[in-house]
Amino acid sequence: MGKQFLKIAAVYFALSVLLSVIIGVSGDYSLSNVQSHIHLLGWIALGIIGLIYVTFPALSVTILAHIHFWMHNIGLPVLILAIIGEIYEVPEAGVWITIGWVLLAGGTVLFMVNVWDRLR
């Protein structure tokens, strides 16, 4: 499971850098918040979690790790797209932002429970 977290973290890193280039070249910084979320919650958070799972393999074989992976990787794209929707004043974007955050927070709680339960 750790390798999957690291692989998807690399994808988020590439997306973050690509968006940074687009923002820098265009001079339009309206998507800076989106880039920050991709970078922090995609690249940094998932990269660190992947390293934890590689370092402590007993954590990565639990159902909690698998559910966390999917909650995080469904919640983050939902959140990112919803933030873009809010920037461009798409109706109901706020509801989708809430859904994205709930999925991310739920996955994070599962990660915390997994760590506390398995690292005794």
Image (cartoon, rainbow, N blue to C red):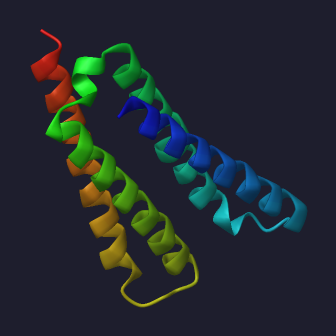
In terms of depth relative to the viewer, which is nearer, 91 or 79? 79
The answer to whether 64 is drawn above or below residue 106 in the figure is above
* Image quarter (top left, top right, bottom left or bottom right) of the C terminus: top left
Residue 16 percent location from the top left of the image: 66, 51
Please provide percent x and percent y for residue 5: 43, 38
Of all residues, the one furthest to the right in this rendering is 25
**Residue at 36%, 86% in the rendered image:** 92
Q: Quadrant of the N terminus?
A: top left
Task: Please say if 13 is above or below 90.
Answer: above
On screen, residue 104 versus residue 10, left or right, reads: left
Residue found 53% across the figure and 40% down from its top = 7
Question: Foreground: 32 or 64?
Answer: 64
Q: Position of residue 118 (x, y in %)?
A: 14, 18
Residue situated furthest top in the rendering = 120
Q: Residue at x 82, y 55 (%)?
A: 21
Q: Residue at x 17, y 13 (%)?
A: 119
